[in-house]
Amino acid sequence: MDFAFGSRRVTINMATRAVLFDTVRARFRDGVGFALATINLDHIAKMRRMPEFIDAYCRQDLVVADGNPIVWLSRLAARPVELMPGSELVVPLCELAARENVPIALVGSTQEVLDRAGAVLQAQVPGLTIAMRHAPSGVFEPSGAEAARILSDLNASGARLCFLALGAPKQEMFAARGRRDAPTVGFASIGAGLDFLSGHQVRAPKWVRAIAMEWLWRTLQNPARMVPRYAASFAILPGQMVAALRKRMA
C-alpha cells in the first residue's frame, strides 16, 4: 500500500506484525540500524503541505499502518495491511530487545514521563536495559545542534533501539538524521506511546478502540489540539478513498 505526493510515494512496506518483528530481529543481529514510522491520516495531511516531512518519510526503512482509516484504505485498494499503532509496539519491541540483549533509549516528552515509562517497561520486561533517557528542550529542532548532541550521546550510550516521543514530524525527521549519524541504532517513532505508559495520558479503553472510536475519545480528552487535527484528516479522506479505488482497479 502506498500514498502519492506528486512524483514521490510513501509505501507501507511492513504489512504484518510478523514481518516487522522478523525484520527488526534480523537488523539487531546484523548490527544494522533502522527508522520505523507509523503512518496515519494526520501524517498524510501534514505531508501534503510539508515537503520536508515527505523527505523524512522517504528515508524511513520500515513503515507500518497506524490508524483504522489507513487499514480500511488498504483493504479498499486490495492491498491489505495490519493495524500497528506505535503505542502498541513499544512493549513488544522492548521484549524483543531484551531477548536479543539490545539496550534501549527513550527520547522525547518530559523527564518525568521518561522516568515513569522506563520504570513501567523494566517492570513488564525482565532483563530490559535502558541505556539513556533524554527529554529535549522546548526549542528542540531535528536539524539543530541539540539534536546533534543527543545523537552523539546516543552513540556513546551503547543503545541500539531508540524510542522517539517527539511528535510528528519532528520524530520522523530526527530518525532520518539518526540513520546517517547513528547508523547502528534503530529509531522507532511512537508518538504518545511513552505518555500512555507513564499514565501522563490515558488511552481509550479497549472496547472504544475495538469499535474504531479512539479518535473521538482523544478529541474529547483534548479538543483544542485534536479537533483541528482530525478535521484536516477527514478533509483528505474522500480523495484517499478515490485513490485507493483506482489502485484496486489498476
Image: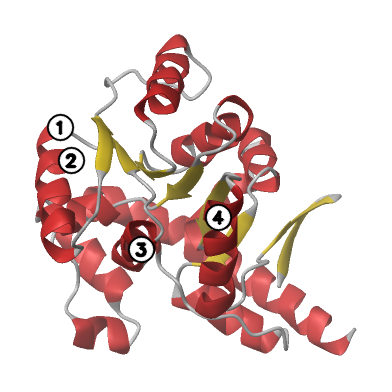
Query: Element at badge 3?
Result: helix
Mark 4 / mark 1, whichever is N-terminal: 4
Mark 3 sits on what residue? 99
Q: How far across and how far down the image is residue 162, in percent? A: 40, 42
Residue 133 image-quadrant placement: top left
Mark 2 sits on what residue? 114
Mark 2 / mark 4, whichever is N-terminal: 4
Is residue 150 depicted above or below 57 in this figure? above
Residue drawn where x is 19% and y is 67% of the image: 203
Q: Nearer the viewer, residue 69 or 61?
A: 61
Mark 1 sits on what residue? 111
Residue type at numbered disc 1: Gln
Q: CA distance from mark 4 to mark 1?
A: 30 Å
Mark 4 sits on what residue? 29
Mark toward the viewer: 1 or 3 = 3
Residue type at numbered disc 3: Arg
Q: CA distance from mark 2 to mark 1?
A: 5 Å
Quadrant location, the N terminus: bottom right
Query: Element at badge 2?
Result: helix
